[in-house]
Structure formats: structure tokens, C-alpha cells
Image (cartoon, grey):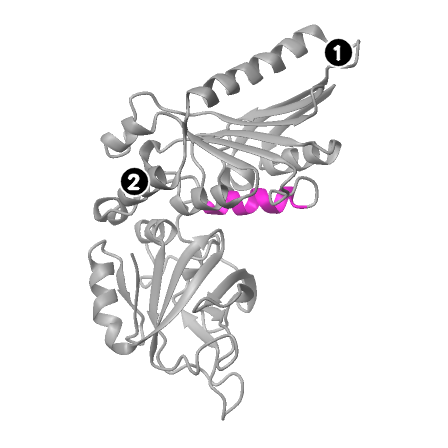
Amino acid sequence: MIFGSVSQPSHRTTSTAIQEIAQAHNFDSLDVAAAYITSTGLYDLDATLRNHFDLDDANRSKKWLTSFDYLRTEPVALEALLALPKSSVRIHEPESALANNGIPYRPFHPKAYLFRLGENIEVGLVGSGNLSRSGLSKGVEAGLVIGIDRSDPETNADLLQSIDMARLWFNDLWDAGTPLDRALLDRYARLYESTDNLSNPTAVEDDTANGDVSTAAISAADLKKLRACRNFWIDAGNVTKNRGADLPGNQVMLKRMSRVFFGFVADDIPENSHIGDIRISFDGNDYKEYSLTYSDNKMDKLVLPIPGGDGPNSYDNKVLHFRAVGPRMFELRVHKNSKIAKFRKKSAAVNGAFKMKSGRDWGVF
């Protein structure tokens, strides 16, 4: 028998509890029911499980039961789940949410993680944390872990019944859920990425206020847009010659807290700190990791593919367009400055067009 608890963030986080479960046995399946799923939550769950229950392992079954309720689940996260091997996604009563701008007839609100090994060993974590970064590690959450080995004659009968009821509950909801396919995902993505929604996205637990309180700071409302929008663009201007006086540079300076679009927290950190790494593919090339840091000029600095190598000949006076395709994964396209008006119009439609102090335009849509 296994017992445990979640008392986040002070003692044991949801992420820590999940990691401890995954370490206990070589589980062959994971079933998750979560009210909503964010890209940052999926990234953190993958990192938590990587050494114990690899989500990319084609020998391990993954079932994800979630909802379109209140337009909180991110389409990019759903695309990533569908792309995983031996992974299935079902949506709880999607038609009601699609027909009512995200408002459901019956809200879907569970947070459960069920691990299984064969027919005998099963462990469940049920708590308050959604499949979001906040739900896994940052927010104030509580939960309980119980596990059984059915082959052990000393297994407590009440505990066995509790696990059986949890499994029956999940299976019933799974059977009633609608399988997510490309057509259903496209319908949801159109609603999620509509002008009305991206102009004022529904807040999720990963949305936090900006620690920067200066007049030039990105507001909490605009940080929601950076989190929710799939596209980010910026006028690169004259890129710093970081590779030498005779070589085109590959470090672009972004507005402070642009990091939120790329999947990071809007926390105050010391200057010259490494924020994290993201994966970028330029013009269809292979995805590679590139660094994002907070510079001593109080801007977020992103390293880009080397000009003339994995990148274009130059980034100078070009428009850089990043499109999210997965958790911390982005396609990069480079355009002439003449495209700024087009991008500005797309961003203005969702009140997501901005300007740097230097005059450089940037935005999201």
C-alpha cells in the first residue's frame, strides 16, 4: 500500500508527488483527468516524468481527459498530446462549450492522475491541482495519494474499494467523452484563437501579475495575451554584433517579460540570469535549443539560429515571427520590414500591438 499527500507549495508539491509515484514502479499506463491543460503544465509534467515514465515511450499508454470549458485548455497543448505515441485525448461534453463560447452546461472540474502496472498495481493522486504550472508546483494546492497491490492478500478492503471506485469513475467519463481528432481540435482552435477571446483571454492559474511595477511594464492583462496567443513578432532593428564586427548578430533584445510568450514565469530575477531554453526551427530546419536570458539592460535576450548556418543570412532590420507549435517549441520565419504593417494589423485586432521604448514594433496575435 502507498499513502502520501500534497501540501503545496510549502512541503510536497503535486509535481513531487507525481515523481515519487513514477519512481515507485515501472508503470505501463497513465490516465489523467484535468479540468484544463496548459502548455507550461504539459512541459513541466513531461520534465517531471522524463526519467521514470517517459511520455514519448511508445510502450506506455497515456489517456488524457479534459475539457473546452471556459476556453482555458490551450490548443497547442492538445496538439502536443495528440502527437505523443500511444496517447489518446477525449473531451468532456465539447459541443456545449463550443456552442456557448466556452460556457459548459455541466462544468468539468477534476484533477486526477492514475498510474497502473499490469492488473494488480495501481496508484492514484487526486487533488486540487490542474495540469498547469501553478497546479503542479507554484500555486497553493492540496491532495492525497493512495496505491494498492491487488495481489497482496493483506491489501485493505476499504482502500481497494476506493481505488476501484476511482477507476470506475474515470472509465465511465472516458467512455462518455468525445475522442479528440483534427476536425474537433480545429473547431476549438478557431474559437480559442478568435478575436473576441484573444482580446481578453480567460485567466488560468499560470497567469500571474508582473513583478515589474514601472510605468513601462507589461500589464497583467497583456501578459495573459502573451500566454494565450500562438504568434509573436518583433522588428529586430539593428542586431548587436555579438559574433564580431564583421559578422551578423544572432541575439535579439525583447521587451522585459516577453519570456511569458515563450513559456516562462513573469518573475523578477537578477540581471544576467538564464531564464531557460526553447526549441526553434528556422524555415523548416531541425529544432534546436536556444537560450533566453534576462540581460543587464533590463531586456529579455533571445539567442537565435546562427546566420548563414541554421538561420537566415541576417536578422538586421527584419521582422521575426515566432509561431508556437508545442510546449517551448517554435517555428521561426524572417520577413522584410514591409510586413510590419500586416503584423501590426493582426495584433491590433486583439489589442496586442506594442512598441519598444526604442520605437521598435512588436506584438502577439
Which part of the image, by quadrant, shows the C terminus?
Answer: bottom left
Magenta region: 39-50
Task: Tell which tag, 2 or 1, sits nearer the viewer.
Answer: 2
Q: Position of residue 89 (x, y in %)?
A: 47, 34
- Picture coordinates of residue 26 (x, y %)? 73, 34
Q: Magenta segment: does it hold 155?
A: no
In the image, residue 299 lies at what x, y percent?
A: 44, 69
Most common SS among magenta residues: helix
Residue 357 visible, this orientation: yes
User: In the image, what residue occupies the spot 46% across and 20% down?
Assistant: 175
N-terminal-most mark, 2 or 1: 1
Amino acid tagged 1: Thr
Question: Which amino acid does the dot numbered 2 rest on?
Answer: Arg
**Within the magenta stretch, is there residue 46?**
yes
- Disc 1 marks which residue? 155
Q: Quadrant of the N terminus?
A: top right
Up the image or down, 220 lies above or below 236; here it is above
Q: Secondary structure at mark 2?
A: helix
